Every structure is written in C-alpha cells, then in structure tokens.
C-alpha cells in the first residue's frame, strides 16, 4: 500500500509468508490503513528491526509515528484502539466477550500453534501425535462455534464482521492449507468440522483478507524446503 496523509508514519516490518505478519496485514487492510511494508531478511536483520524490537528481534513490528509495537496480536489490538473510529471494530464491546476473544486467541497461540509446528517439523509417530493434537484443538474451536453464546449462529467469531479472534486464527489459514498440501494430511476435516470449514472459506474470501494472503505456491515451496531440513537424516561425519 502507498503511504499517505496522517498515516504516512505507519510502517510494518515483516515478511510475505509469515502468518504472524499476515495477522497484522489483515487488520490494517480491514481498517483501510495505508502503510509502508518493509520486508525483512531474517538471516540478516536490519538495524531498524533490531532497534525496534531489541528484546525478541522478531517480526512483525508496527512503527506508528516512530513508536514501535511488537507481537502480532498486541499489534492487532493496538491498531483497533489507535484507529477506533475506523470500521470494523475488532475487539468486542462487552467486557466478557472481550475476555472470551482473548482467551481463544491465547489458545490459538499457546495450544494450537505448537501442534501445527509438530506436524510441520515432525515425521512418523511424532508427526501423527501432533496431527491428532491439532485435530483435537480444531475440534474445540468447532465446538465453540457451535455452542458458545459469543459465537454461535454468527458468520464470524467477531459476529457479523471479522474480529480479533478471526484474525488470530485466520492468520494461520494460509499456512494450514499449504501444510496440508505438502504433507498430504487433513488438518481441518470438513466432515468433522463443518462450521469451522465454512468459517475458513468465508474468512479467506472476505474483502480485505484475500488481497493480502500469501501466494499459495510460494508458501508451499517454502514449507517443503524447510521440512527437508527437519526431516532429513543428519549427514555422516
């Protein structure tokens, strides 16, 4: 996006295939915020990245009027609060609903993502265990869509519009789809998880989301290349 006007001071340090960066790009796109995207080489991190995130030295980093904000879901919440007059509102207005959204967003990061990493890096029994744990986590999200008063009967976790939890989980979808292709495994089973599957398709085709999704072929190529490193036997001395 071209930077202009008062938003000319918005920069995003990231990478085109990072699911965590994708979360932030989705939030910015939904809010219609123009920004300068600066792609980082994580093998040769820029001075700006190291200066902006000296603690973790990771992407994404949002820089707004010279002030850096780090960690993807913290950035998403910051975007919602800093541009609170721009629709959509990403965080629920009700305190309880906000707490539930934060709970499930933490579940995605703390429970689901480690399982997906296990599928990504593993093989054999190790990968199968990670696959089963991933499925169990996705089924819990399916059940939340079915029964939770916060989500049940609504097109998105955020209600009628994409919200905080949608972005937390939705940022992972391109990676999940590519991982399914590369491994020939099913992570989100349409028969077992009809509500989650429908949500996934709706989310990926939503305005403001589909335009920032990474190229599937490039993502699959990246995942295949990285998996080789994890699954290849060590070289003989």
Image (cartoon, rainbow, N blue to C red):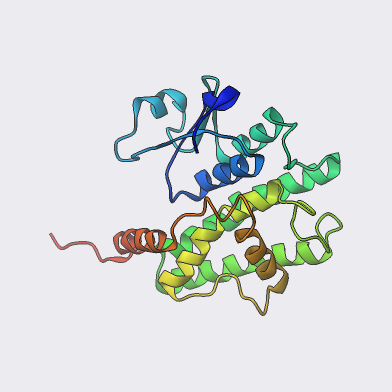
At which x and y percent is residue 51? 41, 23
Residue 136's image quarter? bottom right
Residue extending farthest to the top is: 66
At which x and y percent is residue 36? 47, 33
What residue is rendered at 62% in x and 42% in y? 27
> From where the camera sits, is residue 67 visible?
yes
Q: Is residue 208 left or right of residue 94?
A: left
The front one of 163 and 5 is: 5
At which x and y percent is residue 142? 72, 66
Residue 178 against residue 87 in the figure, above or below? below
What residue is rendered at 85% in x and 43% in y? 96
Residue 57's image quarter? top left
> From where the camera sits, is residue 68 visible?
no
What residue is rendered at 53% in x and 23% in y? 9
Residue 72's image quarter? top right
What residue is rendered at 59% in x and 22% in y? 6
């Amino acid at each position: 996006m071209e930077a202009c006007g008062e938003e000319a001071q918005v920069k995003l340090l990231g990478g085109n295939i990072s699911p965590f960066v994708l979360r932030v790009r989705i939030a910015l796109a939904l809010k219609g915020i123009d920004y300068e995207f600066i792609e980082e080489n994580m093998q040769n991190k820029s001075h700006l990245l190291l200066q902006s995130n000296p603690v973790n030295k990771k992407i994404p980093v949002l820089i707004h009027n010279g002030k850096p904000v780090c960690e993807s879901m913290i950035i998403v919440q910051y975007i919602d609060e800093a541009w609170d007059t721009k629709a959509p509102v990403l965080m629920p207005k009700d305190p309880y609903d906000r707490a539930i959204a934060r709970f499930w967003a933490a579940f995605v990061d703390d429970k689901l993502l480690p399982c997906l990493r296990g599928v990504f890096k593993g093989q054999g029994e190790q990968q199968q265990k990670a696959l089963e744990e991933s499925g169990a986590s996705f089924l819990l999200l399916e059940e939340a869509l079915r029964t939770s008063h916060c989500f049940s009967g609504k097109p998105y976790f955020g209600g009628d519009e994409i919200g905080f939890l949608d972005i937390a989980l939705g940022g992972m979808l391109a990676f999940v789809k590519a991982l399914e292709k590369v491994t020939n495994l099913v992570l989100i089973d349409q028969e077992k998880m009809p509500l989650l599957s429908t949500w996934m398709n709706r989310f990926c085709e939503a305005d403001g989301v589909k335009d920032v999704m990474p190229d599937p072929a490039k993502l699959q190529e990246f995942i295949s290349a990285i998996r080789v490193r994890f699954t290849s036997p060590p070289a003989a001395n």
